[in-house]
Structure formats: structure tokens, C-alpha cells
Amino acid sequence: MARISSIKLLKSKDEDDILQSCKDNVLRCKNNLKKQFAKLGGRSFGVYQSKEIDNFFKCAFEAVKIKYFDSFAPDDDQIPITVIAIGSYGMNEMSVKSSIDFFISYKNVPGYNVRLIVESYIKILKDINLYINYKIYEIDEMFDLLKGDMELKTMFYQIRFVCASKQLYKLTRDKINELKEYKKDEFIKFHLKELAPYDRIKLLNQKPDLKKGYGGFYDYKRIFWLLNSIDDNTPKSHALKVISEKEISEINLAADFISSLRSALHISGGSDELKSEFLHEVCDVMQTKEKKMLGTDILLVTKALTCMQTIGVYSRYLAKSLFYTHFSSNLSFFQKRASRLKNGFYNISSTVYVPKHAKSKEIGALIKDINRLPDIELKFDITTIFYMKRSLIKKDSIEKSLLEFKKIFHRQHCFGILNALLDAELLFLFVRPMEHTRHLAQLDDYHKYSVDEYSLLCVYHLENINDKFIKSLHDDLCSDGKTLIKLVALMHDVGKGLSGDHLITGANIFRAYANKLKLSPKAINMGITLIKTHTLMNNVANREDIYNEQVILNFISNFHDKQAIKLLYILTYCQINATNDGFYNSYNAKLLRELYEIAMSSFDKSEANLLDEASRRTKKIALIKKQKEFLELSKDKQDLIFSIPSNLLFIKYPPSEIIRIALFADNCSNIAINTNNKDGFCIEIITKRGWNVSMVLSKLAHLDLAYMEIFELFDNKCFVKLEYNNPASIAEMQNLEIIIMAALCDKQRANTTKPVILENEISFDINHSEIYAKININAKDQRGLMAYILEVFEEFDIKVANARIQTIKNRTRNLFLIQKSDSLEANYKKILDLIVTKDQ
């Protein structure tokens, strides 16, 4: 938008023309904000807006001069009015929805009706649609009106001339300087209190308030006001007393980004809170680019949290370092001597301090000093954080200090230390595999914090378990067990943000890191198991029927011993508590406890073969997750595959075939048939329960059945596979689907002949497991045998969960897992009588 020329406006004598021109330019400016933001790349957008507003103010002042003086208007300096920018407007840090903070200073001069001119000027600013927040003061009354209002007084710490009388501006500025000196200590204490606390860095919500939240733009402004209050030197010159040029640049760049992000958020329809519903539009406005595996939304929030952390930490360090005399922690010499520790730190009320002029140590020496701190819940003063942050890092010093760092996890209370190392940007030097998780956003509906802070919070809840039963489980752990679970709690999400399944990726990363820490092979394997399964317990408890034996078998098949289940239970408790406030409640606590008890009980009494089946299923699932065709499926279809209850299907088939069968079944609404007539022929049938499978076998009994399978799928569907030794004739193949479809739909019982099955050729284990009975038949192969067996099952409404039938050398070997039911319990002897041939 073209700049308004005040010189050009002076040539116009029509007040209405000037006002209309101003109004048009304000509207044009508002409509072009998104375009202008993109043109500037978001940089210095606040300066751009402030300059535009300056021109609108000047335009309005020209209009009011013409209204009251016409062509006899005096020079601006001769009119006893001055317009002064304050607040964000005064700092050239305007955001799109910021109110325009300014005040008008005037002097009562008998020759001018000043108050009337001022009121007309305000009306014009409103008429041209500016969102203004203004104050009007007579210069001689200003001091008394402002001296008692701390918030208002704050807004005057950075002022800027906009238009009208420069002479009056200078006089007003002198008055404001007097105001700054009046009870300066109260002003300083007010803002130091607003920046508190100084003994901990707050965790950053993933939906932060960019203006007033921790590390928000107000924190940056407060430290600016505080530095501005010291004397006439620039804030930068004071800041350089305690931080470097590079660090000043870091906080300024962070503030610039937050300022730009606020404007982009406002342009996108939001306010000051970075809510998820605006992220897509904000990314578009900010021209955010995707990077590696991370989407633009995640990158934007991650950058925002990083910048807010910088502002939050630096602003408090500057405040504490430059205004240290205002803090009560400045103890007497004798008090300091009494609280001084052998490692040079001071422990005052469980908060760790360092001497004011302490020189930074080499990182290895620092970690040793930290390990000498008392094993209690500790906080770290912001000056101590910076002392740690400036540690000397020599070549190989991190590697040499790893085992010393490991000792931190042996402490009963390590959260405070890990948190301090995180705030000092040292933690990920020691836990380098987690480096990519720093402020890594988790944009779901439940995580409150980014990956790094959420993981650290898991350690906090591990050290502060409120559930009595879970605490008793944790207290029973040996020292090495407690150390391991702390390390796993910190690293369990290390696979997030990387390619592949984050559970497997994380487990592999943990293995490599744990080897560096020289953990025992047993501990490493346990850690790998916990990381691979860290989402499992919560998912099963909340999404599955935990009283279903198959669900429990699938769950416990992931673990080699009961200790892993115990550790996972403790870890799950910590994860849920760290996810968000109130997520761990009486409802899910009861579910988890129940699942834990059932799993532990089932682990004791489960048969080895069932566990072996479930374990092999788990391994096959891990392979499926790596398949390209699986990764291309939607989440719903992936979950559908894993919902198949049949373990035998997973054991029998390779990953690609399991995926094919599942999709084949998913696309089938009622009945689907596949046929293949090469080297014998094969029939695949997807059908819902209740269709007449025994009739199909009866109709095809004249063929030589070599192999048959029945697997329970999802949605009450089952998969039937029939393999015959001899190829079907061309005529049979042409009519085969019609024959099968008609047989399935036939409501009559199959007319089958009872085969000869001797008593010693069948075993019937009614108590095979809590939900399944098992039948094994090893008999002479006979045409129609399978049709007859299935017909018997159908007569008693027996549901086959898994079946495997194989014919070799004229002998048929059959295995059936059938679901227990009242009918089976009451009739299993009748079923045996119908199957077994008594007289032979």
C-alpha cells in the first residue's frame, strides 16, 4: 500500500476528502495484511504496522487542523498538543488485533480551545475505523494522575513521538522521566513478581498463550521495561553485563518470531492462544515448509515452544541477575556459609544456588558436583541454570561423563536434576538419542506437553506415585529395577518424529544407548520390551474386552516374564498422569488394575502351547507393520487386520497373505469366492457364520480333499480354504461358484455318510482353555469326512474358531479349536458319540 504523504494532504483544503482518503487507506491496509505479511516473510511486521498507523494518525491530525483553522493553520509545533505512542505501538511491536495504545498530552493555553480539538481528533480516529486505546492528560496534571497506577505507568516506559508538537513532546518526555524515578523500587518489584518463579522453568503448554503465557510476548516486554528503568543507558547495554551479544540476538529473534506468529494467528482468525484449529491456516500465512518426517503444523508449534522457552529463560535470568538486591534469597555471610555445600553450590530451602561470580566448570566436573547434591526433591535457581548452561564442553567430555551421568538415575529423586539439565540445554548432550524430541509437538486431542517435557513428566510421576497399590509395586523393585524404569520413562517415546513404527524405532535406539551406559543384557532386554509395548496396556484396557481369554493371551504373549507386566503397569500409570491433568481417574485406574490382575493370573496358568501361539502371532504382527502395503492402508484397516482373533492364521501365513485375506474379507458384504485350478484346485470362501459350509463339502465330496482351513475373522466372518489334489474339469470350474453359492444358501442338512473314526483316533479336550475346546482327529481319509464333522457341529450350534485339516498318505489329520458354550458343555458326549464309530 502506498504511503500517505502528509505534504500532499496539506495541499487539500477539504476535510471530507482527507477523511475519506484516510478511511480508504485504513480499509486497504487491513485487507492487504496477509499479502503484506507474506511479502515481508513475517519479519518486522510490527514495525510495518506501526508506520502505517503513524501515517493514519498524521492524516487525522491534518484533518482536524483544517477543521479548526482552515487555511490559517499554524505549524504543528505551535499547537499545544502532542500524540505519543505507548505500549506495543510505542515499541513498534504491533500485532494485527492489538489495540493502538497512545496518549495525547496537551497544555491549556487560553488562545486555543485545546480540549475540543483533542476530542475532535479522537472522533476522527474512530471514524476512520482505527481500534484505539487512548488516554488524554493535561501535561501539568499527568504526574499526579499516573504515579499510583503501576500498570499504566508501565506503558509509559517506552514512548515514541507520532505527530503534532515536538516541543510539547519533549516537555512531556521530561515529565515521564520524573514519573519513572518516582518509587522506582515499587515498579521493579511489581514486574519481578510478575516474572516469578525463579526456581523452576514452567512446562510449556502445546496450546500456548503467545501474549501472556510463560515465555510469551509480555515476558519479553517486562524485561525490556525493567532494563529501561535502570538509567538512561540502553536496555542492551545493561543486558550485555550478564549475557553475550549472541544471547541477546537469541532472545530478540525469539521475540520477533512470536510477534510474527501472533500476527499470523490474528490474520487467520485466531486470538493469542495457538489453538490447533488455526494451525493449517497459520502455516500457510507463515509459509512453513515440511521437513523430513514432520508436518508443517508440528514444525510450527515446535518452533513456537522453542522461542517461548528462550524468552522465558532469558527474561528471568536477566531479571534475577540485574536486580538481585530485590530478592530475599540474598542471605547474610553467616547464613550463606551455613548453607554452602562441599561442591560449591548453596542449598537454601531445597533450592540450589551458585555464588554470583562463580566460573563455569568443565561438564564432567559439573555432573560430579550434581551427584554430590543431597538426594531430596530439589529446585534450581535460574542463575544456577545459566551456570550449568555455560559449562565447558571439551572433546569427548560427554562420552567420558556418561557413566557419571548414569548415577543420576540411581537417586531416589532425579526429576529436579533432569529438569534443570533440560532447561540448561545439557540433557540431550547426555541422552543424545532424544535430541530430536526437544519441544517436539504432539498434536493430538490429549497430550498437553511436547515429547521432551511429557517424557520428563513421566519421571516426575514415577517419583510421586499416588496410587497406593502401584507405589507398593514400585517400592518392591530392586535398585537396578528402579534405575531401569526411570531411564525407560524418560526414553519411552524416543522413536517419535522418526521414520517407521515409533515403538520399534524407539526400542532399537534404546538398545544402542543402554549399551553405552553399560546396562546388563537382562536390563537392556527388559527396557526394549517396555518401550515396544509402552502403549499396549492402556490400549487393551480401554479398547478391548479384558475378560476375553484370547485378548489376555495376546496381551501376555508380548512378555517373557511377569516382571515385565509389573513394570509396564507402573510405566502406564506414569504415562497417563503425564499426558494431561485428570487423565488418570478412578475409572481407568480400575480398568488397569483389573487387566494387571487378570494378566498376572493368566501368566501362571496359561498353557505353553497357547502362549507359544500368541507369541508367534506377536512376532508376525511386528513383521506386518513393516510391509509397504500395510503402511499404505488407513488406520482403520490396519486395526481391522490386528483384530482377527485367529492365532493360527497369523502363524500359518506370511504378512502379505494375511493382509490380502483381511482385505478380501473386508470387501465382502456377505459371501465371496476365489478359485484357482492349477496343479489341483483351490477354493477360498469368505462367509458369515450361519451359512451352510457342510453342504459345500458334501457337494464337493467326490473330489479328493487334501487340505482344509477355517479361520475366524472379524465382523462374524470366517475364511474357508479348500485344496483338492485333482484338478476340476472345465465344466465343473464353469459351474463351481454357482454350486458353492447354492450350497451355502441351502437350508437343508447335508446328506452325509458317517465316516469311520475309531475311539483311539480322536481326542476331545473340553478344558483346553477358558474359551476353547480342542478336537484332534487322526483317521483314515474318507470322502465326506469333513462335511460330516461340520454337520455335527452345526447340529449343536458349535462355532469353529480355527480348523486345520491335512491329508497325507491316505490319512487325515484334523485340528479344531471350537468355542466353549452351554451347548458344548451339555452335549460334548453326544458329539463324541456321533463322531466315533463304536463297532468296528
Image (cartoon, rainbow, N blue to C red):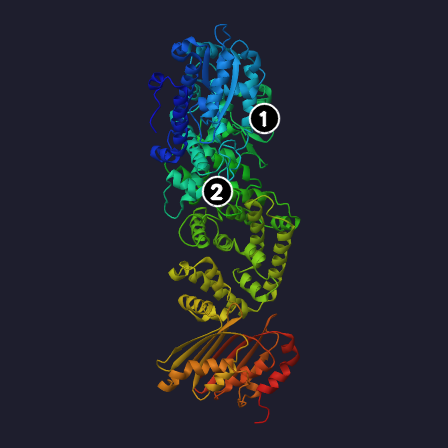
Considering every residue shown, the one lying at the far top of the view is: 110
Quadrant of residue 377 within the rendered picture: top right
Instruction: Give the number of the disc on residue 521.
Output: none
Considering every residue shown, the one lying at the far bottom of the view is: 840
- The answer to whether residue 806 is visible is no
Quadrant of residue 18 within the rendered picture: top left
Compared with 630, 572 (above or below) is above
Front residue of this view, candidates 32 and 621: 32
Circle 1 residues within 10 Å: few <14, some 14–19, many ≥20: some
Front residue of this view, candidates 251 and 648: 251
Q: Of helix, strand and loop, which one carries label 2?
A: helix
Query: Amino acid type of disc 2?
Result: Asp
Compared with 203, 602 (above or below) is below
Give x and y (percent) for residue 73: 40, 11
* Image side of residue 631 versus residue 342, left or right: left
Circle 2 residues within 10 Å: few <14, some 14–19, many ≥20: many
Give x and y (percent) for residue 85: 45, 20
- The answer to whether residue 123 is visible is yes
Q: CA distance from mark 2 to mark 1?
A: 33 Å
Front residue of this view, candidates 511 and 258: 258
- Dot in front, 2 or 1: 2
Instruction: Give the number of the disc on residue 339.
Output: 1
Query: Amino acid type of disc 1?
Result: Ser
Q: Residue at x 43, y 87 (%)?
A: 703
Which quadrant, please, contains the C terminus?
A: bottom right
The residue identified by callout 2 is 452
Compared with 175, 351 (above or below) is below
Compared with 294, 644 (above or below) is below
Q: Of helix, strand and loop, which one carries label 1?
A: helix
Chain-order first, disc 2 or disc 1: 1
